[in-house]
Image (spheres, rainbow, N blue to C red):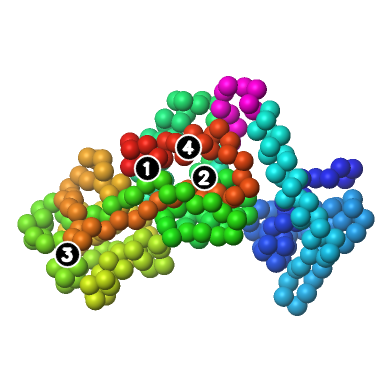
Amino acid sequence: MTTLNLAHLATLRLVLQRGSFSAAADVLGISQPAVSLQIRQLEQFLQTRLVERTGRGIKATAAGQALLEHGERIELAVDEAVRSISEFSQAVSGTVTLGTGATACIHLLPPLLQQLRSDHPLLRVGVTTGNTLDIVRAVEENRLDMGLVTLPAGGRALDVMTVMDEEFVFIAAREQQALFNDITPARLHAEPLIAFEPGSGTRALIDGWFEASGLSIAPVMQLGSIEAIKRMVRAGLGYSIVPRMAVEDAADREGLCVRSLMPVLQRQLAVVMRQDKILSKGIAGIIRLLQKPSAR
């Protein structure tokens, strides 16, 4: 290696953040020997040790820590250079990587990305799904440019920008709607609930709605897919509480009755980005579309 490799610098940062070569290899999707080779090539180029093993894993040497500090500034300078050059062209191009939850990916993003492609045909958007914690971590580690997540969310050196409020609604099979006059925690508590699986932010929000009335829930089914939940509800096997965006279109609420909860239950969706992330034209375009009333 005759020049400083920026990709190898990013690998070094990931190794030290995760504390091992194997953990960094899992994130990067390459083998552990490949990660070790990149670090070894960096050390050979700089002619000094950058990492050392401890009883708790891998940590930076003094030289490695100094390189990391310079690496942050190098990455920022590269981003600034790319942004400056892109200003010579009126066209919005490049690639933006976005992480979000499965429900937003299915029901919110398709029309937004369709509009974005129409407005900026040279811009490419890569989408990854996951839970809020995983997406926030990927943004922190610069594996994603931005995340669209459910609040609360936060992390070191992150900017959090609320972009929309999302109502949660009651759904049941259409032929069962006469059974539900009051859509309150007390009335629904005795009925069979088909819920999101435990551990998700969505499930925690629904649990909290019942707990505010002094009630706990025991769902008859706990599923990870909102489409599976709606299918079970259509079959008359129970009711559910889902984000309104999942039943906003006529085709999505076919066979279902949809009603607001009492009291109303809402969540906030926010964009998270690193504070040192350059706000490219592509990222700014996505944020503008998310903030439009039509995106809700």
Q: Earlier in the sequence, mark 1 or mark 4?
A: 1
The residue to which callout 1 is attached is: 108
From which residue to which does the magenta span run?
86-95
The residue mark sitting in front, 4 or 2, is 4
Q: Which of the marked residues, 2 or 1, is nearer the chain's N terminus?
A: 2
Res 289 visible: yes
> What's the CA distance linking mark 4 and mark 2?
10 Å
Q: Are marks 4 and 3 in contact (CB under 8 Å)?
A: no
Residue 201 screen position, x and y as percent: 40, 62
In screen coordinates, is 39 left or right of 179? right
Residue denoted by label 3: 184
Residues at marks 3 and 1, CA–CA distance in whole angstroms: 27 Å
Q: Helix, strand or loop at disc 2?
A: strand
Q: Earlier in the sequence, mark 3 or mark 2?
A: 2
Does the magenta-highlighted stretch encompass residue 94? yes
The amino acid on which the numbered mark 4 sits, given as a three-letter code, is Ile
On whether residue 196 falls in the magenta region, the answer is no
Q: Which of the two discs, 1 and 4, sits closer to the camera? A: 4
Assess whether mark 4 and mark 1 are in contact (beta carbons under 8 angstroms). no
**What residue is disc 4 on?**
286
Crowd rating for badge 4 (residues with CA inside 10 Å; few <14, some 14–19, many 20+): some
